[in-house]
Image (spheres, rainbow, N blue to C red):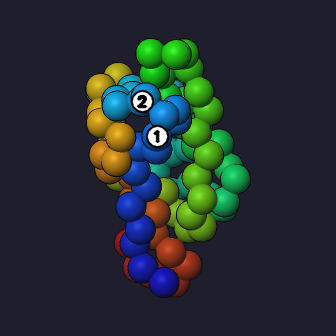
Amino acid sequence: MSVSDFCMPALGADMETGKIVEWRVQPGSRVKPGDVVAVVETHKGAIDVEIFLDGVIEDLVPLDQQLPVGALLAHVRGEGVAP
């Protein structure tokens, strides 16, 4: 396995940007598909964001930055990949 990008998802058809207002994981946390890892604020409100990757979270973006859909939020290191 390798290192994968976890990017800002489109949480609605008209969403262009979002802001991470809470991380529910820390660097080094193990995640699996379906885990809620963040809360993103959009113009429609705060939404829990699930991850669909399996591995260890690295390099979280800071809170409270307005980011476009598709922007890198974190890296996820796969099983057996050295940090």
Q: Quadrant of the C terminus?
A: bottom left
Q: Is residue 10 visible?
A: yes
Residue at 62%, 46% in the rendered image: 50
Residue 38: where, in percent of width, then height?
Answer: 54, 36
Q: Is residue 71 above or below residue 76?
A: above
Q: Is residue 65 above or below residue 34?
A: above
Query: Does the residue at mark 2 contact the one at mark 1 (Cβ under 8 Å)?
Result: yes
Indicate the amino acid at tag 2.
Met
Position of residue 5 in the picture relative to residue 13 (left or right): left
Q: Is residue 73 visible?
A: no
Which residue does the numbered mark 2 point to in the structure image? Answer: 15
Residue 75: where, in percent of width, then height?
Answer: 39, 59
Residue at 59%, 27% in the rendered image: 47
Question: Which of the pair 50/62 is nearer the observer?
Answer: 50
Q: CA distance from mark 2 to mark 1?
A: 6 Å
Which residue does the numbered mark 1 point to in the structure image? Answer: 10
Q: Earlier in the sequence, mark 2 or mark 1?
A: 1
Q: Is residue 11 above or below residue 1?
A: above
- Which structural element holds mark 1? loop
